[in-house]
């Protein structure tokens, strides 16, 4: 008997379209794996077992089954995006437990493509931090369960890395796709502005947040992005030689890149040289004020999202984060800081097509009750390990995390690829070359 757990979304969809397997069988296998493993991993806030099986049958009965790009593919959805009939708790006790009346546009697009939503995944409260834990559960890294899966799309990343689903939907406001993807050995892409519908919270964190895929292969990430973005939105380039800048510099003073992540970048650069690209060392001209700018936007986004909930039910770290953000909100809302950063970095990307950096500066913190700890301790831990992601939310430019190499613990390491507006397809092409020449183990060995 063929097992569909551990197969890619591309493989599953092809088999369903060709009627080699029924969507119900695929979904049932993944639900069984969730039931078996999620008590150890904590990926899901809620599992839609009965509803997902019914929806799988509906997919099988659709007249255009042979045309569906995600036919019968189980998918998990981050718990800050509406799924019809399910509550959206955003990791908090302060949010209402009332069912959504309609799907978020990205969820609707996945379903229209034939995907089946099996559950909603855990996030930190209001999706603020780069660790995922709180009143609804703790998401652990399937490769190293003593450590956090990352955040804020930590539950979605853990679900894919554990083989509970082949793909998942998340979003990224300061690195919330790339951080957990890097921890869990996944491929992700934060698209540039207006490539994929956003609609995340109240204002998308001033336009910094983008929805995107979490997958085990570049091909799956590309397929899911094409579904989310709509036909023709992600154009495939030719196999052109790219000008690639390699930088090991952390944008944040006091948060240096550790040896395994620096080594991964050097090795990836060597692979890209052999692939025929023009590769050289060059650091983007990050301003000294970048850390302050990032903190102001990070806290101000939380202040907006916290406005509609009962603050008494928020954790202390979230209340402090929002209170600081209220003082920054007016300045952040003007967009002047983001525009200055774009103008400063645009000449660099006129000279280079792609920037290659470490995805993280160091391995993730331990899986612990971070929501019970103080604000400063949380901010320090987050900033120390993930200083390389926020600049590209501030600019609104596309950025990827790609598995590459391993840490001394045996958990995956990762690199980041960044490009100017409209470069999503080019980044995916480069990521595919890294995958082809340096393939990675896709699913954590949990059994």
Image (cartoon, rainbow, N blue to C red):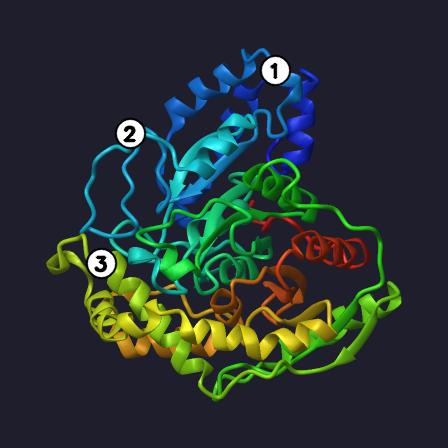
For label 1, the residue is 64
User: Which circle's residue, 2 or 1, is located before the other in the chain?
Assistant: 1
For label 2, the residue is 101
Residue 259: percent from left, percent from top: 63, 81
Question: Of the numbered discs in the image, which one, if any, rests on residue 306?
Answer: 3
Q: What residue is drawn where x is 65% and y is 60%?
A: 403
Q: Which quadrant, please, contains the C terminus?
A: top right
Spatial CA distance of label 2 from label 1 is: 26 Å
Q: What residue is drawn where x is 45% and y is 42%?
A: 37
Spatial CA distance of label 2 from label 3 is: 22 Å
Tags 2 and 1 touching, CB below 8 Å: no
Residue 57: percent from left, percent from top: 49, 15
Neighbourhood count class around disc 1 (C-alpha, 10 Å): few under 14, some 14–19, many 20 upward:
few
Residue 236: percent from left, percent from top: 74, 46
- Indicate whether 129 appears above or below 140: below
Neighbourhood count class around disc 2 (C-alpha, 10 Å): few under 14, some 14–19, many 20 upward:
few
User: Which circle's residue, 1 or 3, is located before the other in the chain?
Assistant: 1
The reply to whether residue 35 is in sight is no
């Amino acid at each position: 008997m063929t097992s569909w757990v551990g197969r890619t979304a591309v493989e599953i969809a092809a088999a369903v379209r060709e009627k080699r397997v029924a969507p119900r069988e695929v979904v049932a296998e993944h639900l069984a794996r969730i039931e078996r493993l999620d008590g150890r991993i904590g990926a899901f806030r809620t599992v839609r077992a009965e509803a997902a099986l019914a929806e799988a049958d509906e997919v099988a009965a659709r007249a255009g089954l042979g045309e569906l790009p995600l036919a019968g593919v189980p998918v998990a959805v981050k718990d800050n995006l509406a799924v019809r009939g399910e509550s959206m708790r955003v990791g908090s006790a302060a949010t209402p437990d009332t069912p959504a009346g309609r799907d978020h546009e990205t969820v609707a697009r996945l379903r229209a493509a034939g995907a089946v939503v099996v559950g909603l995944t855990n996030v930190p409260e209001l999706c603020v931090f780069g660790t995922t834990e709180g009143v609804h559960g703790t998401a652990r890294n399937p490769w190293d369960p003593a450590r956090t899966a990352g955040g804020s799309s930590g539950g979605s990343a853990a679900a894919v890395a554990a083989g509970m689903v082949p793909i998942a939907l998340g979003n990224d406001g300061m690195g919330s796709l790339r951080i957990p993807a890097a921890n869990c050995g996944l491929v992700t892409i934060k698209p540039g502005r207006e490539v994929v519908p956003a609609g995340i919270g109240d204002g998308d964190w001033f336009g910094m947040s983008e929805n995107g895929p979490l997958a085990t292969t570049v091909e799956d990430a590309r397929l899911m992005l094409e579904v989310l973005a709509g036909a023709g939105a992600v154009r495939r380039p030719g196999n052109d030689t790219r000008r690639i800048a390699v930088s090991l510099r952390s944008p944040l003073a006091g948060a240096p890149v550790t040896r395994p992540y620096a080594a991964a970048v050097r090795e990836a650069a060597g692979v890209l040289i052999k692939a025929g690209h023009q590769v050289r060392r060059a650091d983007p001209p990050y301003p000294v004020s970048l850390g302050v700018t990032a903190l102001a936007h990070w806290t101000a986004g939380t202040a907006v999202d916290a406005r509609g909930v009962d603050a008494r039910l928020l954790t202390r770290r979230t209340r402090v984060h929002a209170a600081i953000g209220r003082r920054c909100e007016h300045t952040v809302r003007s967009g002047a800081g983001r525009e200055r950063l774009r103008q400063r970095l645009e000449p660099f990307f006129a000279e280079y097509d792609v920037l290659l950096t470490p995805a993280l500066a160091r391995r993730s913190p331990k899986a612990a009750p971070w929501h019970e700890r103080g604000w400063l301790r949380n901010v320090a831990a987050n900033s120390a390990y993930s200083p390389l992601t926020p600049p590209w939310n501030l600019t609104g430019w596309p950025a990827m995390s790609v598995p590459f190499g391993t840490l001394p613990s045996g958990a995956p390491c990762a690199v980041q690829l960044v490009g100017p507006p409209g470069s999503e397809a080019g980044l995916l092409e480069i990521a595919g070359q890294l995958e082809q020449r340096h393939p990675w183990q896709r699913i954590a060995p949990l059994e």
